[in-house]
Image (cartoon, coloured by chain):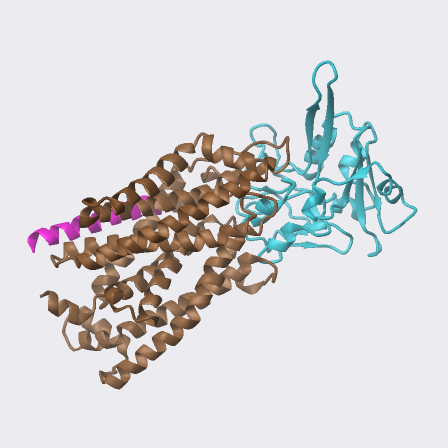
Chain colours: A brown, B cyan
Amino acid sequence: MKNSERLTKAWYGVLVLLMALGGWAIIERIRVGLVATNLTSETTWGAWVAFYIFFVGLSVGTFLLSTMFYVFKIEHYEKIGRDALLVSIISMVVALCFILLDLGRMERFWHTFRYWNFTSMLAWEVRFYVIYIGLLIAELYLSMRQDLIRVAKGTGWQAALARFLTFGSTDLSEESKKRDHKWLKILGSIGIPIAIFGVLGGEGMLFAGVKARPFWNSGLLPVILVVSALVASIALLLVFYVIRTKLMGREVDKEMVKSLAGLLAFFLLIEAGMEFFEFFVGAYGLQDTELATIETIFQGPFSWLFWGIQIFLGVVVPLFIFFNPRLKESVNAITLAAILVVIGILGVRFNIVVPPLIVPVLQGLPWGYYYPSPVEWLSSLGIVAFGLFLYTVAIKALPIDTVEELREGK
Amino acid sequence: MSADKKWAMVIDLQKCIGCDACTVACKAENRTPPGVTYNIVITEERGTFPSVTRVHVPRPCMQCDRPPCVQVCPVKATYKMENGITAIDYDRCIGCRYCIISCPYGARYFDFGLDYSQEMVGCNEVQAPEYGVDRGKREKGKSPIGNVRKCTFCYHRLLRGEEPACVEVCPGDARYFGDLNDPESVVSKLAASPRAFVLKEEMGTKPRVIYLK
């Protein structure tokens, strides 16, 4: 117990430190503007946009998983269904922080609601985000409602919070439980198409719709975004589940971890196959800009990101672990593989955003070059730490683990 | 100025000598900050020795009739004016830079807030009255800093009956400016020439800047 308390303190310490560094970077960015970044008029989107699409993907991926658990009643995974919804909401908050920071005039963010350009993917995205976040919050609330009532009977600040959130309701009947489940199912059924086509498909269209950048201008790109988002989400949920369970001193459900790992390997293979065709079709067209973009990814100054992180760490090593008869039995090895997968997908996001902006749109225009500045790195770390902080506080404050499960654990 | 005018520019590549006077005139006229160049001249070397030629292609904003930048702007800050010019509303633009990404000609630039104060005294004292709006001094935190900027066909000069600065300054007389709605105008006649072409026609952007081979 003593040990875990020290660990908690250390964890909060690290997060607060990172958030302080990030806070300084954000203040610097607000003070001097976007000169604080290494962005230029050529490579005008960079790390923040890459993180933004990474977290939007993570949000949609985790949401899809959790609703699939609820809608299709995959009880096997329901243990992490609520956790997935929480991760989904927090990912969205983190993503919006990133994109807000990226605006040249942050104070005008509300213009995106006030003025609406029908043909702009970005304008549609913003509106889908609002609907989507509302849906996520409603889903999480409904899935927790019963447990909130149970918690409200206790003492302490968690109970007070729960009493506030339940608005004094004490309805624990079978009937109310059924009603909650019915609504979860309805919201999930509305949410799935909104998440796939609106939030993440729109995200893909944001890039795929840009004809000036042939590398993006492909019908497969939105699909790759959806599949890779699922990959990253399964991996992250697995990591969170294992770490959290181990820290709480409970027993890891090894069968569930193993079957999640199987699901992860399955989607990872599909994603790798799609990426293969994306590059193959692109290169086969022999279009100059497309070839130059692929060359930048394969042989440019940051080719290590593709070969080292995206392919080797993100695909080869995890697949080796998932298919090795000894390693695939080990929870630790699987967790390591899942962490690598998440890092790999982050590489995928950087390689989607940056390389097409390195190659000039007209021959003779200057080539771009981009590596994030210290302000971009620190602010990104700070925002991610903020997300982890929210997560840590939320799992403490809200009944994210089902109460029955906690009882069993004790 | 009557609303039925549709402005266009014709650039004769045979007459362009690649002196970059247009680039300089544009910078002086529009007082653009470092990193923002509405007009540039792209120079390409063609052929192998001894049959080598250089081709100079001046590149302002193409003022497309089907502009991808207008298509993607989330807040309608960039839009087509009736006179054919693609405009940016600096007071509405949120600086998301999606238009820069989508422009097939690289004609858009982000104003990072830099200036020439190291090189020039009083460089921030006055700004060009772009789109006919007088914005006074260039000051930190005020638009167009933090906005996307591009060539305006010198709309503020058109308003007082003058040609764009690049057209006026061109020593080779390679640039023509006029009304495409008027079939008798010089630009209309030149645009109908078999030498006429536009950059990246396959993009479907329908540029209002027409080149002569």
Q: Does the magenta segment cover residue A359?
A: no
Residue A141 on image: x %, y %: 31, 72
The quadrant of the image that shows the N terminus of chain A is bottom left
The furthest residue to the front: A325
The furthest residue to the right: B184
Q: Is B189 positioned to the left or the right of B104 in the image?
A: right
Q: Confirm whether residue A72 shows in the render.
A: yes
Q: Residue at x 35, y 67 (%)?
A: A67
- In this view of the protein, which residue sits in the foreground, B63 or A216? A216
| Number of on-image labels | 0
Residue B94 on image: x %, y %: 55, 53
Q: Confirm whether residue A95 shows in the render.
A: no
Q: Residue at x 48, y 45 (%)?
A: A277
Residue A96 on image: x %, y %: 42, 56
Query: Looking at the rendering, which quadrant does residue A47 occupy?
Result: top left
Residue A115 on image: x %, y %: 58, 63
State the predominant SS element of the stretch in magenta. Answer: helix
The quadrant of the image that shows the C terminus of chain A is bottom left
Q: Residue at x 31, y 67 (%)?
A: A69
> Is the residue A195 above or below the residue A289 in the image?
below
| Magenta-colored span | A1-24
Q: Is A43 positioned to the left or the right of A381 in the image?
A: right
Q: Does the magenta segment cover residue A16?
A: yes
> Is the residue A407 above or below the residue B153 in the image?
below
The furthest residue to the top: B50
> Is the residue A237 above or below the residue A157 in the image?
above
The furthest residue to the left: A2
- In this view of the protein, which residue sits in the foreground, A276 or B32? A276
